[in-house]
Image (cartoon, rainbow, N blue to C red):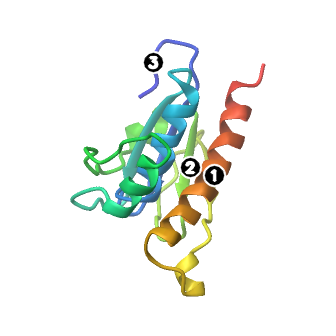
Amino acid sequence: MATPTDRPSVLFVCSSNSGKSPMAAGLMEKLAGGTVEVHSCGTKPGTAVNPESAAALLEKGVDISANTPTAVTEEAQRSADVVVILGTNARLDEVPGTRYERWEIDEPSLRDIHGMERMRLVRDEIDARVHRLYEELTAE
């Protein structure tokens, strides 16, 4: 996780680590181009990345299809400058001294928007939030 460099680090966490958190990590990695250390985990990891999440990101030039969901650890949280919890389902025991943010992402399916249209809306909201966080982490 954190390295002896001066790069800021962020850990994105969702419940399954198959949709929102790998999307956020992929978008941050592309945007940051190595200037931010990026990781993603899940509180109850699934077995594979959601194919619609991967397809929506591929439209933005980011390929997360080969990612494998992993479980969040206390060490991963402690090593990050910021832990971003995406959605309302993920629950973490917060590590003292670590900065946490919760991003409650709009759920288009509640408005009867499904499939790729839903995933693009989720992706675009996460992308906007990633851009704001990147600007904050890299501000001089």
The residue identified by callout 1 is 101
Q: Nearer the viewer, residue 107 or 58?
A: 58
Q: Please tell me which of labels 2 and 3 falls first in the chain.
A: 3
Alpha carbon distance from label 2 to label 1: 5 Å
In the shown orientation, is residue 31 left or right of residue 136?
Answer: left
Amino acid bearing label 3: Thr
Alpha carbon distance from label 1 to label 3: 21 Å
Q: Please tell me which of labels 2 and 1 falls first in the chain.
A: 2
Answer yes or no: do the residues labelled 1 and 3 have beta carbons within 8 Å? no
What's the mark number on residue 92?
Answer: none
Picture coordinates of residue 1 (x, y %)? Answer: 41, 28
Say if 25 sits above or below 92 in the image: above
Q: Residue furthest left?
A: 47
The residue identified by callout 3 is 3
Give the residue drawn at x 45%, y 40%. 61
Say if 86 sits above or below 118 in the image: above
Image quadrant holding the C terminus, namely top right
What's the mark number on residue 84?
Answer: 2
Amino acid bearing label 2: Val
Say if 117 sits above or below 79 in the image: below
Answer yes or no: do the residues labelled 2 and 1 have beta carbons within 8 Å? yes
